[in-house]
Image (cartoon, rainbow, N blue to C red):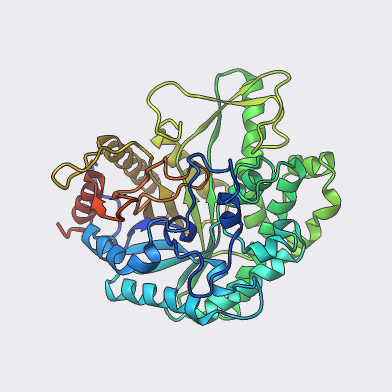
Amino acid sequence: MTDNPFPKEFWWGVATSAFQIEGAVDEDGRSPSIWDTFTHTPGKIRDGSDADVATDHYHRFREDVGLMRELGVNAYRFSISWSRILPDGTGRRNPDGVAFYRRLCEELLASNITPVATLYHWDLPQVLQDRGGWLSPDSRHWFAEYAVAAKETLGDLIGVWATLNEPWCAAFLGHSAGEHAPGLTDPGAGFVAAHNLMLAHHDAIAAMREHRSDGDQLGVVLNLIPAWPASDDPADAAAAAKVDMVQNKLFLEAVFNGRYPDEVVEWHRRFGVADQIDLEALAAARQPIDFLGVNYYNVNRVRHVPGAPAPGPWPGADEAVIVVPEGPLTDMGWAVDPEGLTWTLKRVATEYPPLPLYVCENGAAYPDADPVDGTIEDPDRIRYLESHIEALAEAIRQGVDVRGYFVWSLLDNFEWAKGYTMRFGIVHVDFNTQKRTIKASGRWYRDHIARVTGDG
């Protein structure tokens, strides 16, 4: 890095999510989530595993905060399990569930690590799915009630809140592609779920503002994946624009402007769900946010293929095919495209009102060798992190207001439908013994933080 554009107060963090690490799925009053149901449905998870134990963070959180101290991070992004706070989805609050997150936050604050909480990382209580889930118009009210419960019980310890993590995944992977819980395969259902998630986001922001403390920051986290044409052919550019519309523009426009692009509104009519999507309600619900979280991993390269059906997660994007790029890929099958991070951050800063941005997830899955003398070498992950942090630095040099960066993930964990076959962590977890080992990438990140903050 030729110069250091990162301010002293920049957040260098790590990220996780509740379902992927906590385990303890039936302890202390927690009720099942849709992902508990999904993981226990045969054939849904690649390796046939579940997250009943995961990395046992529920019992080992103090050890994990100790790892964060060793890494030198000053912020930790985690999610809260709705099922722990409100086991019935609404109504009664579970004091044992609240107590866990209070203990976690107290441990973080005692370690000078800022807690950054996400309310929803895909684990809807099953009792609410049984009442219609995100396809129910009542879901916005359920979520606002949950947001208030979290804010009232944890707001003295947490000042930074994101409503949703990656609503595209919750909506379209869960309701149109069938790859995630609840496992539906209805193109129209994805748009309905996306709409209700956006209403829920705005309602939660409004409700939490009524209980706001000085200095609180309220926002949302979107996974923004550039959709770039695979060639200079105008047909490829048109196909890429369709993918971009479902992946990015739908959510950016709904969050910032309380509207959907005209193409999306047309898809509502095409898939027969326009009567379930109240455009005026979205406009009326719109709330400004204090920050936008951006999750970035890769670029989608899109080719126009006549007659090809729309890819499952991008309904409406007919004749658009996501092509596998040339060159080395991560275990997820994604190319390493750091320039896409700079491009994405500049796009948001250019096309939407100025806001602080945080890179809330960035990282890579690679196979890890077994520890040798307590060391796990993972040079590919180091190169990935180094190149993307340099891309982030370039965005800041070009004037983008980025205030934090969170590596995904602190720990190897349960990677949703791929089970335990993907390792994203900068800390290795032996899933048989739960032994944690900081990888070479974790030590590199520790040294990078010390270098740019002047603490080294």
Q: How many marks?
A: 0
Give residue 89's quadrant in the image.
Answer: bottom right
The answer to whether 382 appears left or right of 124 in the picture is left
Judge by depth and name the residue closer to the eye, 126 or 346. Answer: 126
Counting from the top left corner in percent of width and height, residue 291 is at 50, 61
Counting from the top left corner in percent of width and height, residue 72 is at 24, 60
Q: Is residue 274 visible?
A: yes
Question: 419 above or below 229?
Answer: below
The answer to whether 156 appears left or right of 40 in the picture is left
Residue at (24% x, 52% y) in the render: 437
Residue at (69% x, 64% y) in the render: 128
Quadrant containing the C terminus in the rendered view: bottom left
Question: 2 above or below 170?
Answer: above
Judge by depth and name the residue closer to the eye, 370 or 317. Answer: 370
Residue at (46% x, 58% y) in the render: 17
Give residue 390's quadrant in the image.
Answer: top left
Counting from the top left corner in percent of width and height, residue 296 is at 46, 44
Quadrant containing the N terminus in the rendered view: top left
Counting from the top left corner in percent of width and height, residue 34 is at 61, 57
Q: Is residue 399 visible?
A: no
Residue at (59% x, 47% y) in the render: 169
The answer to whether 256 appears left or right of 406 in the picture is right
Judge by depth and name the residue closer to the eye, 235 or 422. Answer: 422
The answer to whether 15 appears left or right of 248 in the picture is left
Question: 163 above or below 266?
Answer: below
